[in-house]
Each structure stands twice: as C-alpha cells, then as structure tokens.
Image (cartoon, helix red, strand yellow):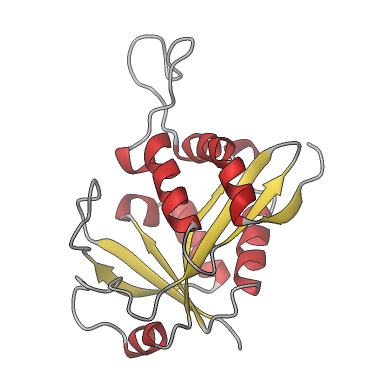
Amino acid sequence: MGDVFLRRLSRWQADQYRDQLADLHVTAYARPHVGHGGPHGGPGSEPRVEPFHSRDRFRERLAEHSARPGFDLVVADAGGPVGCAYGYPLARDSARWQGFLGPVPGELEELTAAGRVFAVAELVVAPRHRRQGIGRRLHDRLLSGSGAALAALVMDPSDAHTPEAGAARRAWGWQRAGQVRPPAAGDVGDALEVFVRPLRR
C-alpha cells in the first residue's frame, strides 16, 4: 500500500470532505450481510450498519460537531481518506454529564467546568488499512493539538467492548470513568461508556 499522510482539515475542508468521510465511517462500522447472496450482499447493496453508524447520522453529527468552537479534525490520506479522528472542547456549561450513573468523577467535573476537557468524537480507520499504526498516529496527532488537560471518550457499549477497542484504549492510556445515559439518547438505548485520558500540560 502507498504512503499514508496525516493532515489537519479546517472546518470548511471538513464540510467539503463530508461525503468521503461518511463513506469511510460506514465502511469502518459495516457488518457482514447474512442471508441470500452470501455474506457481502448483492450488487449495489449498502453495508449493514447499526442506526447510529448510518451514513446520514454521521453526516448530521459531523455538521453539528464541526460548528463547535475548537473543532479539530485529522485525516489519514492515501489518495483519499483511509482514516480520520476529530473532536472538540466541551463547553464549560456542557450538560454532557447529565445522566451519569453515580457521582461524576471529580476531575472530570472540575475540568469540564474549567473548559479543559477535549471530547474525542470519532476515530476510524478503513478495515484494509488497520494494524499499520494509523489509528495511533491519528489519535496522538489529534490530542497533541487539543490544548486540554483531559480527553474524554464516550462510546456505545457494543463498540467499546470489542477486543480491538479495549486493547487500543489500554495501550493508548485511556481509563474507564463510568457510564452516562444522556436524556436524549436517540437511537442509542443503553448507557454509554465513558473513558478519560489525562493530557500532560
């Protein structure tokens, strides 16, 4: 495979790449089709993904997130996007932790109120480009530019507890902080898993 280059995209560029990033997202979360026509479906069939990971839902989230102050996006490019990571600083008055099951960890609550928490909203790598260190490179580049004291990651349990995700989080220094059930969970029914990672500042 060719060289993979990382580069930051401005908010305007992220909007221009929205369709390509949505395709990447769906490819990354696709599950094999089951039924007639074998595991890959018929010609022109869409990859099967959960509602939260659908193309339209990703496009909506990217449009919403890219409008937030401090939004940052890093793309891995090999003649087209093969991975991306993006996030944004949580607002000081963020209601993000409303619905936390049990007490919110003190550091998380205090640093959110101080505007020093950076939320990682997306980190994906196309299946055929995995196990090449691209995910770690995207992760490190994104967090290195955040200027925050703490990074936070909120994941659906079905994504959080895959062996690959767990191994990556442990290797990259993330720690479980608890669970949160947002008031408007949409198509995510279960409580979401919350992970944090201190950033040296």
Q: Can residue 96 be seen in this view?
A: yes
- Where on the picture, by quarter, is residue 130? top right
Could you tell whether 144 is left or right of 41 in the image? right
- Looking at the image, which residue is at 32% across and 64% down? 193
Where in the figure is residue 176, as x and y percent of width and height? 37, 73
Give the image location of residue 196, x and y in percent: 43, 75
Total number of numbered discs in the rendering: 0
Query: Where 4 sits versus 66, above or below?
Result: above
Question: Residue lying farthest right?
Answer: 3
Q: Pick the residue in front: 169 or 146.
A: 146
Quarter of the picture containing the N terminus is top right
- The residue lying toward the viewer, choosing from 170 and 87, is 87
Relative to 44, 106 lies left or right: left
Q: Residue at x 25, y 68 (%)?
A: 180
Residue 90 left/right relative to 80: left
Residue 54 in view of the camera? no
Up-down: is 54 above or below 117?
above
